[in-house]
Image: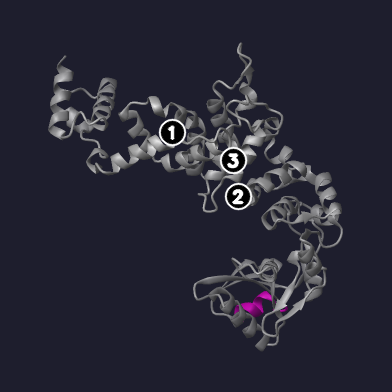
Amino acid sequence: MPVMREIAVDIIRHLQNAGHEAYLVGGCVRDELRKVEPQDYDIASSAHPNEVEKLFTKTVGVGKQFGVMLVIEKDHQFEVATFRSDAEYVDGRRPTSVTFSDAKADANRRDFTINGLFLDPITDTLHDWVGGQADLVAKQLRTIGKPKERFGEDHLRLLRAVRFAAQLDFEIEPETFDAAREFAEKIRAVSAERIRDELLKLFCPPHAVRGLDLLRDSGLMAHILPELLPTINCDQSPDYHPEGTVYNHIRLALEKLPTDAAATLPWAVLLHDIGKPDTASVGADGRIHFYGHEKIGAETAEAILERLRFPRKQIDEITFTVRHHMQFKDVPRMRKATLRRLLLRPTFALEREHHRIDCLASHGRLDNLEILDAEQTALDEQPALIPPLVTGHDLLALGIPGDSAMGELLEDIRDRQLAEEFTTREEALAWAKEKAAQ
């Protein structure tokens, strides 16, 4: 039994021994029934927050007014929520108040049937008051109760429906999907942070492609990522892009994501060609061109990521990759110093993986990666090349003024070092002194 589950069972046992009902609930039950190990374990109980506080040594009232407590055991956190019924929702986010109730009522106020299952792990008794088991077997996502009521209560459920369907590879029940389309614009009322967190899960491999398509088909794309809509009918020249439109290229690229992809990689893939619709033109040769799409794309990507409240470091990494992804086509013609500068960029690992995926989703050739990897091997064998031989302080000590010319001189020295024209600091300084005297 996984450690997290053992601790959760101990918490439930402690609650039950104190005279309270207590169950595993929600996603952990759903995943166990699917034979998938849960990432976390949530608990629902008849115990009120004050009673939970008395029963456990370390608790945090993260949502005490709504009956939600964190119980901390052995450095692991578990959400323990009191059975409740919700009052009216007025902001599309949370109820104005809650009334503590029983387990069945608590199940019926939840979002989707597959998340409304309660399991007593002590007796191994499953309680299904909402039809969740049948929907699990049918691989179907359905709201508990009327879809319009559920989506009207909490608008984030619109995006969660798409995310769960993609993540679990389930179909969205027709009435539920129709309601999601009808209510799609209400997602605008949800905070950027909550939308971002759902999108991060939505675009995780291996279900990122299905997530993208469901986002489009549900109508949510128009309100969350409208910049992607023009890519759907944006044609590309078949000699470089036999896959067709920009949207098809993005889909194929998302399909190529490795399962252990870094958090920023799906977004670099998703947004790398976002500037193509705005830069499309047809040349005299009849081919479709997108001159400058990487620059426009980086600006658009930055605006999207800022709107979604991404951390600044991730925004910078993704937009840099988008802005410079076309440089990779010039790898066969790059000087050794330029190649090595590329390899030494802090974003290179992200850029390299993005380029690999970009190629596989279009022409399929990986020649440039072979050149880069060979150069990387050569550079790894000469670690002395990596730190600069000379700094600005060194040049000041030689009497070279600290103006813009010094910056150009430092760049020139660095290029010559990477090209292995200099191997020692003394050689570099001698060359700099001679250069400055000219």
State which region is magenta: 46-54
Horizontal side, residue 103 vs residue 326: left or right: right
Q: Name the residue under label 2.
A: 200
Quadrant where the image shows the C terminus: top left
Residue 197: give x, y in percent of width and height: 62, 51
- Of marks 3 and 1, which one's residue comes earlier in the chain? 3
Q: Name the residue under label 1.
A: 368
- Of marks 3 and 2, which one's residue comes earlier in the chain? 2
Horizontal side, residue 350 vs residue 336: left or right: right
Q: Gap between marks 2 and 1, in whole Å?
A: 30 Å
**Disc 2 secondary structure class:** helix
Residue 243: give x, y in percent of width and height: 64, 33
Residue 7 in which image quadrant:
bottom right
- Name which residue lies at 82% across and 59% down: 88
Circle 1: is it few (<14), some (14-19), or many (20+) Cα within 10 Å? some
Up the image or down, 37 lies above or below 167; here it is: below
Up the image or down, 271 lies above or below 36; here it is: above
**Disc 1 secondary structure class:** helix
Q: Is residue 271 visible?
A: yes
Horizontal side, residue 126 vs residue 348: left or right: right
Kindly indicate whether the residue at mark 2 contacts the one at mark 3 (C-beta within 8 angstroms). no
Q: Is residue 345 visible?
A: no
- Inspect the magenta stretch and tell me whether residue 52 lies in it: yes
Up the image or down, 217 lies above or below 85; here it is: above
- Name which residue lies at 61% across and 45% down: 255
Q: Gap between marks 3 and 2, in whole Å?
A: 17 Å
Q: Name the residue under label 3.
A: 253
Furthest-top residue in view?
Answer: 284
Residue 105: give x, y in percent of width and height: 81, 71
Give the colouring mode of the picture. Answer: one colour
Observer-nearest of 12 and 256: 256
**Identity, as a three-letter code, of the amino acid under mark 3:** Ala
